[in-house]
Image: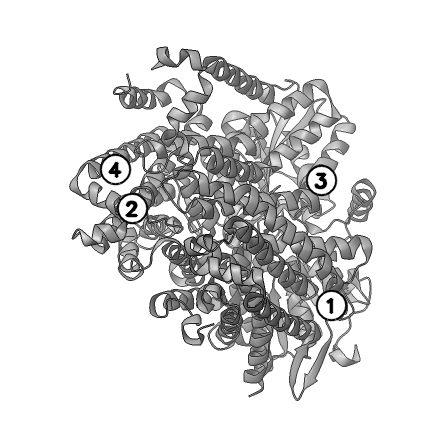
């Protein structure tokens, strides 16, 4: 029983972080219909921003959120504006050119990080990094609990933003039907730029929250990109609520897989779920929840 | 002139190892030829049929492990892998395509990426069969590079000719119609699932053959080498797009460019900066040399970004555009 | 214009190639393959610095028989196939008569086959897979002990002190080092009379080890033996502490557990953790402490056993070159085989035992983190501090 409960807690807490990672990807995929294969790398950049703030300015990682998120928002906007948007006008045979472009961007970001910070492992040690509290026999990591609640908070904010504000509605309109949105007077270029920026800012939040309990090196992005698209497909494109479900499902699947099947299967379980969902529940949880 | 270019190129390639005895350059050219095979395979499924695959390494690795396991488990020569590697890769491609071809565009790409990762994990975890991360080592059959060179050349020629024949056949037209508009193709009565399967299996066959060749030539494989997302799957895509998507000779050009660029950066422009730094003794140049040696992935990344922005159809696809840029306007009439 | 561009780039290319290979004839070239970029770059860099430091010392002392040694260091990026390209280049392009380095087991394994086939001696100084010296390849020498011997010091500790350890759980990363090392340890644990409760691999870089640790905890092993890289090691220990998991002993199988970063990242969670190791600055070899201090002074970062291996390897190569009848690979091989010297990494002599050939045999040590410092605790004769055993529970540390 203790094993089961602890696994459940571990899965849900990790799932909270995963939802944040997935939410950004979900928005980008929803609006632009492209897979952002630089998503994990953007998270890596955010983590370095937070790390630099902590290391040089002594800024607490949670305050680092206020630096990393705007910084990544800007970076995301620039990437969209100067590398991805121009591709829309270029004649090419494969529509997947934008996806390939994100691969290139990911490589460039990783190598720039390596130039500046070298390949060394970095980590941020705070007073709460290893802090825990116990409910019964089950241990909770303080940092992960905080991360979980911030993730939920961001989901609520995004949900409000997408349904109640003008920009949010334009984003959803573009996601549903780009041409129709254009006809209705939505500046779709501007919307794509904002969306990419927001997606980057969200993954920046995830990276920053992960930093106190994890560590950092330039190649960290790849696995997280993979997790992000698994979550996105699980949750459904463009759905914030779906991303939360997707994230927690993946977190739980990995945790229970690790406990009851084997830690080595950790990654594979996510990928198999991913293919199953693609095939049997195309559209993900969004199809069930409708939001 | 253009008509004879492939034959001239072939003649040069046949003569190359006889003229250039340096085995380091021979080694690089073997890699180029191997990438021609993989690139042609990718081009078949992605460039001509429009189903972008991020999972070429799954086929490559299967081919390589086929050869490796034949050698390590059955005690036969790894060359038998060349006979079976293509077919085992097809055995992986078949169920995958059967299930996942109902997905379109980016979703198919993601599914193939997942296939890639799943194969890598299986090869890592299934220690009893694959030796896990210890990998499989065989002693190469020949010390000289020349036999490998000609085998690789034969394989490369085979794949280019195969692509050409297929694309000139009825199948080729079906492939293109699927790429241009799958729904329209379907409404015309083309069984798109069937033809996508054919295309994928041809691609898998070629890639698997390249994998077997890799095992025989390199003599060492482990899951991270042959099932690598970055070094195989994405490299295959780069070869395809840099050379030219949907062109027969695109992968040939792409393979050459990518291997050259990789080696160029890895050795720091073939030691150019290091040499210059040594000659002048300049502290600055030593630092530059050091950074360039470390920057090969950065170079790759920038190349990708630039190629996609400037030459979205690759070097072969946008050849006319390049010529227009390079040749001044007034010569244009004369040049063509 | 087009022609001009092509011609110009050709000229540049060949000039570069020529400049690159042009070097003074009165030096002895030695090839080194190391991962200078990529995931393993950190340790590649430590080894690189150590090689260069030893090289400067050797050349400053007059070089080898009046000739200076020149190192040609090739980057393997930590990938076996690139490693093969690199060593091909060293052998055929630069025509080096002897090669060193290698770093990870997989790259080493892939490269030595090329060296053997081309009959160029290769001195392995870090790759620890047992099979490297079990092939009977006469051109391959190894300075460091194979992975199966890493826990040697630990075994004698168990026999003498920790006799109450009855059960063991083994966790390892799924790398060559982890997969092979854990298999060997199963045999060793059984030989020591311990029951192996579980043995599980994981993919390096996992975010959360708690599910795995909970499972281990529920089996109540006396000993937890882990083969992990630094950051996985730090997370494992941190999360074990968070779960209040108290086996009688945590032991690391070298790799990540002995590095300064381990303490930096895991902090208090490292307290009283044991690890097998090959080298610490406090080992009783002449020059060991010296090497550590010189490295610290020169590069301003601490070094560790990989660096010591590289540093010693450079001296072994120089010594072999000094004694070689001529500078052909064959003669250098013969003189390497006759090596018998003392280095900062311990005595070096290539012998054959069990299935291994041309393997240097070294004792291994047991270290323990005590008050945030890595102390050598076993064998007793060389210990810097008394071992702490039994280990107190987490809430009493």
Q: CA distance from mark 2 to mark 3?
A: 53 Å
Which structural element holds mark 2? helix
Q: Image point 72% across, 62% down: which residue?
A: C265
Query: Is C237 above or below relative to A182?
Result: below
Q: Label 3, on which residue?
A: C49
- Nearest to the eye among marks 4 and 1: give it: 4
Q: Which residue ends up furthest to the front in the rendered image?
A: A184
Q: Quadrant of residue B110?
A: bottom left
Label 2 environment density (alpha carbons within 10 Å; few <14, some 14–19, many ≥20): many
Q: Are marks 4 and 3 in one subunit?
A: no
- Nearest to the eye among marks 4 and 3: give it: 4
Q: CA distance from mark 2 to mark 4?
A: 16 Å
Which structural element holds mark 3? helix
Q: CA distance from mark 3 to mark 1?
A: 28 Å
User: Which of A45/B39 is in front?
Assistant: A45
- Nearest to the eye among marks 2 and 4: give it: 2
Q: Label 2, on which residue?
A: B179
Q: Label 1, on which residue?
A: C270
């Amino acid at each position: 029983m203790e094993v089961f409960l602890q696994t459940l807690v571990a899965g849900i807490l990790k799932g909270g972080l995963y939802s944040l990672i997935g939410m950004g990807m979900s928005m980008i995929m929803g609006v632009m219909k492209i897979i952002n294969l630089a998503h994990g790398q953007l998270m890596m950049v955010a983590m370095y921003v937070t790390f630099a703030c902590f290391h040089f300015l002594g800024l607490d990682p949670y305050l680092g959120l206020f630096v990393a998120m705007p910084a990544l928002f800007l970076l995301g906007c620039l990437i969209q504006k100067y590398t991805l948007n121009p591709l829309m006008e270029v004649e090419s045979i494969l529509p997947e050119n934008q996806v390939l472009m994100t691969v290139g961007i990911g490589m460039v970001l990783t190598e720039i990080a390596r130039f500046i910070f070298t390949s060394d492992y970095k980590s941020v040690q705070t007073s709460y990094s290893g802090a825990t509290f116990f409910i019964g026999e089950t241990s909770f990591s303080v940092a992960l609990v905080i991360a979980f609640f911030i993730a939920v908070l961001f989901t609520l904010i995004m949900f409000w933003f997408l349904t109640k504000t003008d920009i949010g509605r334009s984003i959803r309109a573009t996601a549903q039907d780009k041409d129709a949105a254009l006809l209705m007077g939505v500046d779709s270029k501007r919307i794509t730029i904002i969306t990419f920026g927001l997606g980057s800012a969200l993954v920046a939040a995830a990276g920053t929250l992960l930093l106190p309990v994890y560590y950092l090196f330039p190649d960290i992005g790849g696995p997280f990109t993979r997790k992000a698209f698994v979550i996105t497909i699980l949750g459904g494109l463009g759905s914030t609520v779906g991303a939360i479900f997707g994230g927690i499902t993946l977190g739980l699947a990995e945790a229970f897989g690790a406990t009851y099947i084997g830690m080595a299967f950790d990654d594979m379980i996510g990928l198999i779920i991913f293919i199953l969902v693609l095939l049997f529940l195309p559209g993900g949880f969004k199809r069930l929840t409708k939001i | 002139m253009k008509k004879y270019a492939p034959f001239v190129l072939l003649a040069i390639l046949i003569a190359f190892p006889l003229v250039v005895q340096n085995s380091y350059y021979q080694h690089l050219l073997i890699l180029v030829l191997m990438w021609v095979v993989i690139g042609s395979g990718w081009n078949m499924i992605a460039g001509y049929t429009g189903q972008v695959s991020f999972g070429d390494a799954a086929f490559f690795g299967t081919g390589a492990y086929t050869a490796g396991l034949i050698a390590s488990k059955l005690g036969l020569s790894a060359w038998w892998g060349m006979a079976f590697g293509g077919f085992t890769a097809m055995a992986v491609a078949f169920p995958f395509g059967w299930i996942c071809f109902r997905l379109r565009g980016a979703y198919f790409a993601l599914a193939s990426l997942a296939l890639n990762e799943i194969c890598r994990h299986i090869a890592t975890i299934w220690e009893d069969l694959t030796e896990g991360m210890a990998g499989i080592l065989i002693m190469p059959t020949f010390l000289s590079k020349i036999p490998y060179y000609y085998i690789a050349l034969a394989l490369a020629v085979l794949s280019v000719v195969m692509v050409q024949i297929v694309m000139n056949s009825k199948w080729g037209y079906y492939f293109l119609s699927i790429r241009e508009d799958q729904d329209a193709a379907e409404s015309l009565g083309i069984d798109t699932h069937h033809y996508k399967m054919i295309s994928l299996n041809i691609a898998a066959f070629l890639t698997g053959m390249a994998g077997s060749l890799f095992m025989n030539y390199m003599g060492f494989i482990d899951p991270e080498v042959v099932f690598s997302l970055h070094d195989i799957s994405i490299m295959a895509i780069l070869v395809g797009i840099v050379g030219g998507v949907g062109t027969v000779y695109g992968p040939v050009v792409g393979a050459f460019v990518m291997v050259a660029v990789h080696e160029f950066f890895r050795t720091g422009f073939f030691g150019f900066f290091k040499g210059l730094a040594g000659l002048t003794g300049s502290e600055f140049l030593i630092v530059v040399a050091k950074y360039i040696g470390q920057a090969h992935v950065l170079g790759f990344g920038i190349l990708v970004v630039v190629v996609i922005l400037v030459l979205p159809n690759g070097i072969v696809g946008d050849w006319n555009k390049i010529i227009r840029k390079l040749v001044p306007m007034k010569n244009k009439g004369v040049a063509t | 214009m087009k022609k001009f561009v092509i011609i110009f780039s050709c000229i540049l290319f060949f000039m570069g190639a020529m400049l690159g290979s042009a070097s003074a004839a009165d030096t002895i070239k030695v090839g080194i393959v190391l991962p200078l970029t990529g995931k393993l770059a950190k340790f590649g860099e430590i080894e690189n610095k150590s090689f260069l430091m030893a090289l400067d010392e050797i050349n400053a002392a007059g070089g080898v028989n009046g000739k200076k040694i020149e190192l040609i260091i090739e980057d393997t990026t930590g990938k076996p196939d690139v490693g093969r390209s690199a060593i091909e280049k060293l052998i055929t392009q630069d025509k080096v008569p002897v090669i060193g380095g290698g770093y990870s087991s997989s790259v080493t394994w892939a490269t030595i086959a090329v060296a053997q086939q081309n009959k160029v001696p290769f001195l392995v100084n870090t790759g620890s897979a047992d099979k490297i010296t079990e092939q009977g390849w006469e051109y391959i020498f190894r300075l460091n002990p194979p992975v199966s011997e890493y826990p040697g010091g630990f075994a004698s500790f168990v026999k003498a002190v920790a006799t109450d350890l009855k059960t063991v759980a083994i966790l390892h990363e799924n790398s060559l080092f982890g997969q092979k090392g854990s298999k060997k340890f199963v045999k060793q644990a059984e030989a020591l009379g311990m029951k192996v409760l579980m043995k599980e691999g994981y993919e390096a870089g996992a975010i959360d080890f708690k599910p795995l640790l909970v499972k281990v905890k529920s089996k109540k092993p006396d000993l937890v033996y882990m083969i992990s890289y630094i950051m996985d090691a730090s997370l494992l220990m941190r999360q074990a502490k968070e779960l209040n998991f108290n086996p009688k002993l945590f032991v690391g199988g070298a790799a990540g557990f002995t590095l300064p970063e381990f303490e930096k990242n895991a902090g208090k969670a490292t307290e009283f953790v044991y690890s097998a190791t090959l080298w610490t600055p406090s080992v009783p070899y002449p020059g060991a402490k010296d090497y550590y201090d010189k490295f610290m002074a020169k590069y301003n970062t601490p070094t560790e056993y990989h660096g010591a291996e590289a540093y010693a390897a450079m001296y072994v190569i120089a010594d072999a070159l000094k004694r070689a009848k001529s500078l052909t690979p064959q003669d250098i091989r013969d003189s390497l085989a006759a090596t018998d010297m003392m280095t900062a990494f311990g005595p070096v002599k290539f012998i054959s035992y069990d299935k291994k050939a041309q393997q240097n045999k070294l004792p291994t040590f047991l270290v323990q983190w005590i008050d945030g410092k890595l102390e050598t605790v076993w064998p007793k004769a060389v210990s810097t501090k008394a071992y702490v055993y039994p280990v107190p529970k987490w809430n009493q540390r």
